[in-house]
Image: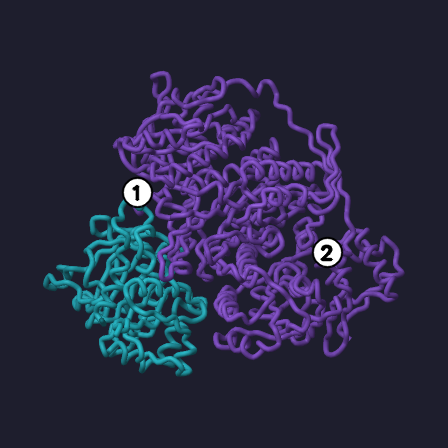
Amino acid sequence: MTIKIIPIIAVSDTKLIKLSKDNILSLSLPEMKEIQKYFRGIKRDPTDVELETIAQTWSEHCKHKTLTGNIEFTFSGKKKIYRNLLKETVFKATQELNKPWCISVFKDNAGIIDFDDDNGIAFKVETHNHPSALEPYGGAATGIGGVIRDILGVGLGAKPLANTDIFCFGKPDLPWSKLPQGILHPKRIAKGVVAGVRDYGNRMGIPTVNGGVYFDEGYMANPLVYCGTMGIIPKDKCFKSVKSGDLILVVGGRTGRDGIHGATFSSVELDHESDVSAVQIGNPIVEKKVMDTLLIARDKNLFRGLTDCGAGGLSSAVGELAEETGARVYLDRIPLKYAGLKPWEIWVSEAQERMVMAVPPKNRAEISAVFARENVEATFIGEFTADRKLTLLFNNDVVAALDMSFLHDGVPKVTKKAVWKPVVAKKSALKPVVSRNCGQDLKDLLSSYNICSREWIIRQYDHEVQGQTVIKPLHGASLVNAGPGDAAVIWPYTVITGKQKNYKGIVLSNGLNPEYGKIDPYWMAASAIDEALRNAVAVGGDIDRIAILDNFCWGNPNKPEILGSLVRAAEACYDMAKIFGTPFISGKDSLYNEYAIGGKTYSIPAALLISAMGVVEDIRKTVTMDLKSAGNLLYIVGVTRNELGGSQFNLIRRRTGGAVPIVDATISRLAMSHMGGAIRRGLVASCHDCSEGGLAVALAEMSFAGNRGALVDLDAVPVAGTMTETEKLFSETNSRFIVEVSPENVHDFESVMAGSVTALIGSVTAGTTVRVSAHNAIVVSEKISILRACWKKTLSW
Amino acid sequence: MVKQLPRTIIIRTAGTNCDYETQAAFALAGSAADRVHINRIIEGSVTLGDYQILAIPGGFSYGDDIASGKILASELKHRLGDALQAFAVAGKPIIGICNGFQVLVKMGLLPDPAAFEQTTTLTFNDSDKFESRWVYLKRDTTAPAKTGGRARAVKCLWVSDMPDIISLPVAHGEGKFVAADKKVLDALEKNNQIVFRYCDERGNHTGYPLNPNGAANAIAGITNTAGNVFGLMPHPERYIYCWQHPSRRASEGEYGWGLNIFKNAVNFVR
């Protein structure tokens, strides 16, 4: 017999805990007891297949138990009970906003919004953190491979148009002597992750168009790898249905022993003995073939249900599709990479490049032919039933028989405690900040890890395959000297331009600010949302047509203060989304990001990534961030506040304290609305948002990207209260833009911006320097060639 | 009666990924372009002879396992060699872009379709990494003085109508053009088979990054002596509209220079 019976109905609690730990089930005692109760009810012990199936289905990775469970939150002495944090914050904002252009939110593999008359656009961002810590290349490659399958598996299949990637790594200059046992050096991880995304993304023919990298020593042992994919889908293909009697078809890669326990392993603290076999092995060409043929089968209407094999493998994929029907699967029919897999291994393996479909029996021959014509393996492995049971057979033996209702709804609700104590700023931290050499500060900021050029990464990704990337990650006056774009714009002309020209496009951007989270997770979340939105608006995005995604990467939620910071961030998500009018359409959480070194456990700095996707009415009316013409005028939009808390200036000067940037979403939304309007009316020559490094860095980037000088008067910058020059230059106040306007558009621009703080601060020059003055004295005067060199040198590996 | 549009076959296989935009470029240039899986040609349900233009688009055919384009080159040569050679020798336009260029040289359809032997290759970039960036290309208008050639324009139907210097994007890890020996390289020069060289904004000789791969004699694209078979590393299909250019101030009108390449071929067969 190839299966084992696991005795649980008569064992002690201690044994249950041991059983969960020894088999990497990652189930808690109450969960194990619930399983025990179920099997006592049916008067038998489970098989290994059954226990593994339950563990995968109930994993934090698949069920999001923390964010959907009960949370007792204590904040400044006040108690609040959440019954389901996601539903009461992120999802609630979407429901209350109730945007008519939201097509599918939070229920499928990706969120879908309306694009044009015929199509929707789908976006999903995933994390692949633990695998990338152990095996950076493979972990990142399968991360991108997995999120592409989410897009292929949304509705009845979307065509991927673009990838995004955001990484958090440790400091790449970490001395070897400080590297703990069992950890890969951050530079090695960074190089491996970039190579993994490059090789998988490039081979899939999907451009990687937007991203970011954040360096902090807190990510040394536990890097974060966020991978996103956006795709386009016909409106009549956005929903799936499964009918009893439909056949279960598995398409693509074969099943092997790679990636066993990926879903449950992601909830385990890493240490130097973590098992690398939990990492999957990717093969992009297999996935490319699946993509090509799946879209053909979709357009021929040959299947009506579809999902990808991700975490939990077939167990989760079939389990999801069969939730309302039931399913019978013959495990011995599943094609294997090699012989010798046990039935439970076949069922939970996270081998890559596999999709599962529900096929009406009449289409059996035709759909087989579609895949065979392009050498794609497709195998019928069972059928959807009407009994709401999951029945698994292996060589005619029943090896699992579980009720779908128990499998999907049986997981007991947990109650976790959360607490948040606001950090009170010391009075000494409020002393005015005066730097003696702001020019040096600017150069040091430009060459610092979190601001310097990402060209080394960006140019290894084919960011223009498909030919539709009309705003690229790097652009500027010449083909060699470029600056960092705020957002990418995709014009999907190969899909949408038929008989009629259609200039609609999609803007993609992101926001992430772990440094602020160390001071206040609420304002970190608010800032990430503001940053993602203003990035999209800076190229011409329309604040009325932007949807956002949340990705929470946090430490161990069983620690009340860590969960408390997560609750604060989630509350900000609700508050901000409501005022900005930007619904969340999909999200993901990755918890338990911690690592044990020498018996001590370290948690990552909490990171909330906000990814934004918006519809651009006319891609011809988008703008880039490089300064265009001498004689044009420079404006700043938004008030600058004294907010150096968590700033990159503080970081490089090893300062602490100061106020963290807040967001006044009502004012910000109005400014974004005006700003986007001005761009779409063609009144703006270039636009760049102020983020890390503040006004000074934004101005420098615009200048060296456009190879144009700039002359700015700090006295003209609208500020709140009294601020020093240093504070004005480097404060990271949200909701600000620097805008270039030609003299003939000044009048119209100012009238469009009326109602939002907008001030003329200087002009574009034909010179070769960035010059900033205050009180009739020069504060910064730096050659743009030198500023550019500072920006470019750091990450030119 | 409506005159039938010239027909283009775009051959694709596992790992081909620039087929849609190549189809869009031919369509915009006035051709009816089909994306056809290689299996259909091998099984005989599609015939190359039914088409006037043939294109092998960019991508990572078969994952570029062994070497870029190598497996597809072998498959095409051994399964469809006669038909391909006949297409080339008949003077019908053939273009190989990026991975397609790698395929053309690795099966030997370039530089001499009559010989049909590999004498050149495209290998790993000198930078040792994938390079996705825009470059300037100079259309060879004169043979270099050192080969003693007379000043005459390269004869290639694909570039007959366009300015001398254009810009296009490249995206490749193996794009460094190398000839088997000096004799082969000199012959290419002498016969005016170099179509595009990497150059700077003014057309002068340049190094990395504007020569993104360290190609011999800065070669970005070559043709056969008849001028109908054309292979190049840059992607003309990614610059058919002006908005695709990274510094948009350089663009005028609605279209990009890449479109001319496709138009030249379509006009040639029309």
Among the two numbered marks 1 and 2 on one chain, the one whose residue lies closer to the N terminus: 2
Establish whether labels 1 and 2 are both on one chain. Answer: yes
The residue shown at (36%, 36%) is A702
Q: Colour of chain A?
A: purple
Number of marks in the image? 2
Q: In the rendered image, which quarter contains the N terminus of chain A?
A: bottom right
Disc 2: CA contacts within 10 A as few (<14), some (14-19) or many (>=20): many
The residue shown at (78%, 68%) is A401
Residue that numbered label 1 is attached to: A477
Residue A481 placement (x, y as % from top left): 33, 43
Using the rendered view, name the quadrant where residue A242 is placed.
Answer: bottom right
Q: Is residue B79 above or below residue A790?
A: below
Residue type at numbered disc 2: Trp
Residue that numbered label 2 is attached to: A58
Among the chains, which one is cyan?
Answer: B
Q: Is residue B89 above or below residue A32?
A: below
